[in-house]
């Protein structure tokens, strides 16, 4: 199971859900509901294109999936963020 936390707000459509905005701090599972923790958004497409400015890994599988990707730590985010930014992650869905 690969779990991440959003570092920025993202607009998109996770598996089986309506398009919506997901705020910073939302936990995301890049696998299936069977491997998610309560409250996780199941979003394999977002996790497949993970980048260090959008997602931070929460477990070993997430760390392995992001090898070689520049990562913004939560400490860096807290020190340098006014809390705003966002991005689009529609993953080709309309």
Image (spheres, rainbow, N blue to C red):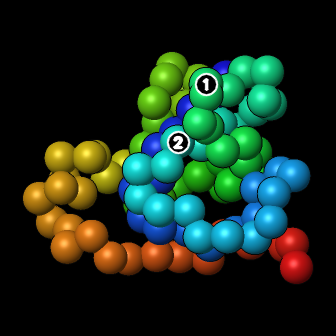
Residue 27 circle label? 2
Instruction: Please say if 87 is above or below 78.
Output: below
Residue 52 appears in view: no
Q: How far apart are marks 1 and 2 (CA)?
A: 9 Å
Q: Which of marks 1 and 2 is nearer the N terminus?
A: 2
Residue 56 place in picture, x, y as percent: 43, 44
Residue drawn at x 87%, y 52% is 16
Write down the quadrant of residue 40 in the picture.
Answer: top right
Picture disc at residue 59 = none
Q: In which quarter of the image is residue 36?
A: top right
Q: Is residue 35 left or right of residue 40?
A: right
Q: Position of residue 4 (x, y in %)?
A: 52, 39
Do tag 1 and tag 2 residues touch (Cβ < 8 Å)? yes
Up-down relation of residue 46 to residue 61 (above or below) = below
In the depicted structure, whether residue 34 falls above or below residue 74: above
- Find numbered disc 2 in the image and state the secondary structure of the residue it sits on: strand
Query: Crowdedness of circle 1 by 10 Å Cα count: few (<14), some, many (20+)?
Result: some
Name the residue rendered at 56%, 62% in the picture: 22
Where does label 1 land, which residue?
Answer: 37
């Amino acid at each position: 199971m690969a779990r991440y936390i959003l570092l920025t707000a993202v607009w998109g459509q996770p598996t089986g859900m309506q398009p919506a905005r997901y705020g910073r701090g939302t936990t995301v599972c890049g696998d299936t509901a069977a491997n998610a923790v309560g409250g996780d958004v199941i979003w394999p497409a977002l996790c497949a294109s993970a980048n260090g400015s959008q997602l931070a890994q929460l477990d070993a599988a997430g760390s392995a999936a992001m090898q070689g990707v520049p990562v913004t730590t939560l400490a860096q985010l807290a020190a340098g963020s006014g809390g705003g930014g966002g991005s689009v992650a529609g993953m080709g869905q309309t």
